[in-house]
Image (cartoon, coloured by chain):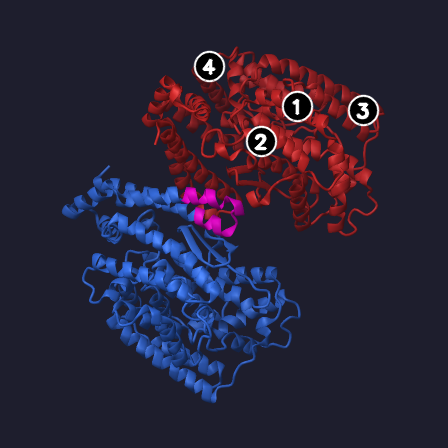
Chain colours: A red, B blue
Amino acid sequence: MTKEQEFLAYLKEISLLQEAVGLSEWDSQTGMPEKGATYRAEMSSYLSGMAFEKSTNQTMKDYLTYFEANQDELSDFGKQVFAKTKENFDLNNNIPVDRFQAFSKLTSNAHSIWVNAREAKDYAIYKETLEEIIKMTKEFIPLWKKSEATNYDVLLNQYEPGMTTAILDDVFKQVKDGIMAIRAEIEEKGTTPRTDFVSYNVPIENQREFVSTVIERIGYDFSKGRLDDTVHPFMLNLNRNDARITTRWAENDFTMATLGTIHEAGHGMYEQHVDAKYDYTPLAGGTSMGIHESQSLFNEIIVGGSKAFWSKQYPLLQSLTGDTFKGIDNDTFYKGLKETKPSLVRIESDSLTYPLHIIIRYEIEKMIFNDEIDVADLPKIWNDKYEEYLGIRPENDLEGILQDVHWAGGSFGYFPSYALGYMYAAQLHHAMNKVMDVEEILASDDYSAIREWLTENIHQYGSSRKPNQLIMDATGESLNPQYLIDYMKDLYFDVYQVR
Amino acid sequence: MTKEQEFLAYLKEISLLQEAVGLSEWDSQTGMPEKGATYRAEMSSYLSGMAFEKSTNQTMKDYLTYFEANQDELSDFGKQVFAKTKENFDLNNNIPVDRFQAFSKLTSNAHSIWVNAREAKDYAIYKETLEEIIKMTKEFIPLWKKSEATNYDVLLNQYEPGMTTAILDDVFKQVKDGIMAIRAEIEEKGTTPRTDFVSYNVPIENQREFVSTVIERIGYDFSKGRLDDTVHPFMLNLNRNDARITTRWAENDFTMATLGTIHEAGHGMYEQHVDAKYDYTPLAGGTSMGIHESQSLFNEIIVGGSKAFWSKQYPLLQSLTGDTFKGIDNDTFYKGLKETKPSLVRIESDSLTYPLHIIIRYEIEKMIFNDEIDVADLPKIWNDKYEEYLGIRPENDLEGILQDVHWAGGSFGYFPSYALGYMYAAQLHHAMNKVMDVEEILASDDYSAIREWLTENIHQYGSSRKPNQLIMDATGESLNPQYLIDYMKDLYFDVYQVR
């Protein structure tokens, strides 16, 4: 065995342990018996502790030191793996162990405090904890910092390598202005679509059959995945041949499970098509939150927002539901799916207003880490921004500042990934349209060309390329928000018959 | 930490790894995506390898040596744990590693050779492999041997500690004579029950609802378990709060899933009620194959063979199936379930003839390990015994000698456990009847007294007591096959209206 092979074998052990933790997590969310929870926590924490130990112990340090000094002993592939391993190591290891543990404990407690605050709809209960989390994050930032310009850039980079506030300030301004302009025009000249049928009763078993067929048509491979029910939908990949998705169902809103599952299937399709050569290395799996969201949102927004697509899928829904949708024609059905209406809650929002929710969070996070605000003032700042951008104001903290779990978990800089995913998806769609007519394909019985283009340009690379490089190579330019704005304008002006 | 606490913490690690392997196994049998199999094999073998390594490495040897010499440092509980750990260690460790690996490889290949032989219905394909397995097993027996009288006793003891051929020869003779006598009397004077309704179509969803309700009534706790579908039904306990069962369904034979699930629920109920103090030690979990089968067969044969029980459960089946069973009254229904008819295949046999299948295997295994027969003659010996005991003769090796997987896996001495389970179940039933009227309880709406008696006398002890001690304590005497014979006589003479 060469030293590189030894190193790869060591990384494989870590990967196998993480896979076991993943299975344990999936099981505990999909159907573990209720009373198994405390036992399960023991098992999960033992396995994840072992994975963490192997990722940070002296053996790992020795490998990193050795290859740092002897890069010439590494193959090109080995160099890529080494670089990513080093990157992950630095992220974990620059924090002293006792501070890391204190932070884990803090965020673990924060979760239940956040839950309590939500129940009481009272930010005051949560404020001090949030302050603590922010304080510790600020303590860590200098330890993480490499060449980033601002403190918040350090956080952004943990989720979207290469992303900066300099880029985002500019991009989000364009997106915000674009959306506000579209909304104003719709408000003034638009015709609101009929939407009553969205809440028609569709038995869950019919929804399940429908959506399973639809995601298979889009390219989700059930021989490498499965669909289960959970309260919070997710995709979890154990390996490239086992990328599982979940959804939740509502009898009186078939769109929730339908679009939710199409979304998760996009995450799953990404993982199912990463090149097998990255197996058991840190290069297996998607490269960033933003790119991952670009794949789920390509499915949900581009495919699931296509008129041609629904003209093919709606008949299946009709055939499964008897007379339920009688009298609702293709056009009415499609337009109803794409209604836009400002909402206070991010996860309930439509595809036009969604980026505004993200921009609000981005602006607030930036202020927090630039020390421009007092954490006590957050609810007011939050509510003011909702009023300004969306024209509605939360009546309590539950529908305002307390709605997201992210901050309680110490995740700052994560939210922008969602909006990046939107913009990437639209930009990829634009590039794809140069080599094929996407709408024509979505009107056909064979969608494979779309999935293959995404595999060719995004999926296959796993984490071996950074987001900006992937987007540059796939589309010929760096992030350009204009494609999203153009896409939304075309779509919503059509739906609202503005032109 | 005391040395004992250290030892227990070390055993806990092994237990947690085994739990992860268990979950992986459960998942791969219940719903892992098809293409995930090769990746899964890597994960399972890594985790089980680690568990095996920890069970046999120098650290373990040091603990065992230390406590062997310093028993006074162990608490009473620690002594029990130590003894069981030592017992398990000796079983694994007296075989040289290279021979153990060779045996694993042999049995792993044997499985596919056995499958091929089954497809060709030709024992000749399998003969040499079986000879090899027997040869290696004979090589290992002296290494396993402690104080057992015969070679076959060594094998028996691996599944049922304390069991001997001296006991079984006697017991099985009584059982065989008893069953043959019952069968002769039924043949001569009995009235065969009506059974056509057993193959009435019952949709699987109705069966699922029915059987889930029934096993919950019997005492299977769904907050500590779940029911899934597999080709080969099993119970798998991750821990006492997570003992999962599976079943298979046939639309045209509701008895298969019904009795199969009641059987597996018995295994699950055992694990769900082991005392929590044995958690994460080798004393958690059932004590032997025979005692485990006594619990599953108590459910299947005693409860599932009770007229009072069916008088309570049959109305539920009727209410779920519309007019399907119209005109079939309680008595007809019950008697149809208990038809006896000789079959060539063990797993398709009824509760009267089942022990004969086991006795045939026992007699053959004994001959093999006493060097009394040539392996080439096995099919003829097998077929002759079926003709003698059951009055029917296999037409090919598939319905004869090739029907069971056990020998291909190197499991000799395992079969008797099934028959021991029958006898234990009947003996426990007899003892239970001294303190309550079991049939009266089964005619009521509350079966908890039965489950509680089994927990009190069997379940709670986990592996901390040997089978013979459990049976002695619970029933006041050692294994006595007369209870099974009496039970069968009463039941089948009633069903066949002999008296």
Label 3, secondary structure: give it: helix
Residue corresponding to mark 1: A423
Which label lies toward us, 2 or 1? Answer: 2
- Describe residue B237's horizontal placement relative to residue A412 as left or right: left
Q: Which residues are magenta?
A: B24-44
Mark 1 to mark 3 CA distance (whole Å): 24 Å
Q: Amino acid at mark 3?
A: Glu
Residue A363 % position (x, y):
61, 17
- Describe residue A480's horizontal placement relative to residue A15 as left or right: right
Marking on residue A187? 3
Which label lies toward us, 2 or 3? Answer: 2
- Report the residue at 27% width, 48% height from top: B98
Which label lies toward us, 2 or 4? Answer: 2
Q: Amino acid at mark 4?
A: Lys
Residue A323 % position (x, y):
79, 51
Which label lies toward us, 1 or 3? Answer: 1
Mark 2 to mark 1 CA distance (whole Å): 17 Å
